[in-house]
């Protein structure tokens, strides 16, 4: 790769990270995901994004993700919706799969492109969605990290099963992240009212 192309990739990644992640020193910390046997319940129904890392970006209004099994076994369709700053409803569709099919951990690959993984359901794909903690009716802690030279970029999202969760549900999810050494002070709460 040429030096110019490498700088282009770096600028793109940094631009993305400023909007939806945080940049921290050194390499990515090691994090274990929950057991993959939770995927059948996790990847069904709707999750509401309570909070997320936003870097210098902004929180969203009414973000949610709906998951359902795709027509092809091993793949899941994902529909993400939110209300933009102008008040318009926005919807993007994508596809998700286990990064290492049959693997022991809930480590997934997600692309917001319809039929993104068709024909690759049994292939090993790049993981970008790690379920670190999960309580079936209440919350999920979703994380990812990418290392670059002397720093890393982390994403963190707290998802809940109801649009406006009880305080103890949020506290339990935040505790899961904090107990793993993941900083929750960078999380920004999304607006989930007037949806």
Image (tube, rainbow, N blue to C red):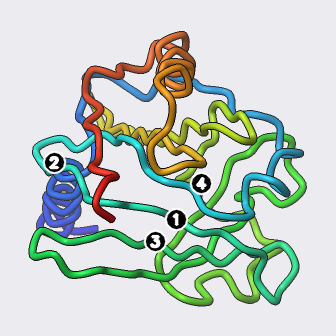
Given this view, does label 3 or label 4 mark the residue nearer the observer? 3
* Residue at point 35%, 22% (across, down): 184
Mark 2 crowd level (few <14, some 14–19, many ≥20, 10 Å Cα)? some
Residue beneath disc 2: 18
Residue 175 has which mark? none
Given this view, does label 2 or label 4 mark the residue nearer the observer? 2
Residue beneath disc 4: 127
> Is 43 left, or right, of 164 in this rendering?
right
Q: Earlier in the sequence, mark 4 or mark 1?
A: 1
Mark 3 crowd level (few <14, some 14–19, many ≥20, 10 Å Cα)? some
* Residue at point 71%, 67% (across, down): 97
Residue beneath disc 1: 65
Quadrant, the C terminus: bottom left
Secondary structure at badge 4 equals: loop
Q: Earlier in the sequence, mark 1 or mark 2?
A: 2
> Is 172 left, or right, of 56 in this rendering?
right
Pinpoint residue 190: horizontal percent, then vertical percent. 29, 47
Secondary structure at badge 2 equals: helix
Residue beneath disc 3: 80
Q: Earlier in the sequence, mark 2 or mark 4?
A: 2
Pinpoint residue 156: horizontal percent, then vertical percent. 41, 38
Q: Earlier in the sequence, mark 3 or mark 4?
A: 3
Q: Are marks 1 and 3 in contact (CB under 8 Å)?
A: yes
Instruction: State the CA–CA distance, disc 3 to disc 2.
Output: 21 Å
Quadrant, the N terminus: bottom left
Q: Quadrant of residue 152?
A: top left
């Amino acid at each position: 790769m040429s030096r110019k192309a490498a700088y282009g990739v770096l600028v793109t990644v940094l631009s993305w990270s400023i909007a939806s992640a945080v940049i921290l020193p050194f390499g990515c910390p090691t994090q274990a995901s929950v057991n993959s046997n939770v995927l059948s319940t996790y990847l069904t129904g709707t999750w509401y994004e309570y909070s997320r890392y936003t870097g210098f970006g902004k929180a969203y209004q009414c973000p949610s993700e709906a998951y359902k099994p795709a027509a092809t076994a091993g793949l899941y369709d994902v529909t993400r919706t939110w209300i933009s700053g102008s008040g318009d409803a926005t919807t993007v569709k994508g596809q998700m799969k286990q990064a290492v099919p049959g693997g022991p951990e809930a480590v997934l690959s997600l692309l917001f492109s319809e039929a993104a993984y068709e024909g690759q359901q049994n292939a090993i794909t790049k993981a970008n969605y790690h379920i670190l903690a999960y309580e079936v009716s209440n919350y999920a802690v979703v994380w990812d990290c990418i290392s670059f030279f002397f720093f890393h970029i982390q994403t963190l999202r707290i998802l809940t099963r109801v649009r406006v969760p009880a305080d103890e549900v949020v506290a339990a999810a935040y505790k899961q992240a904090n107990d793993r050494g993941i900083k929750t002070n960078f999380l920004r709460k999304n607006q989930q009212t007037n949806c």
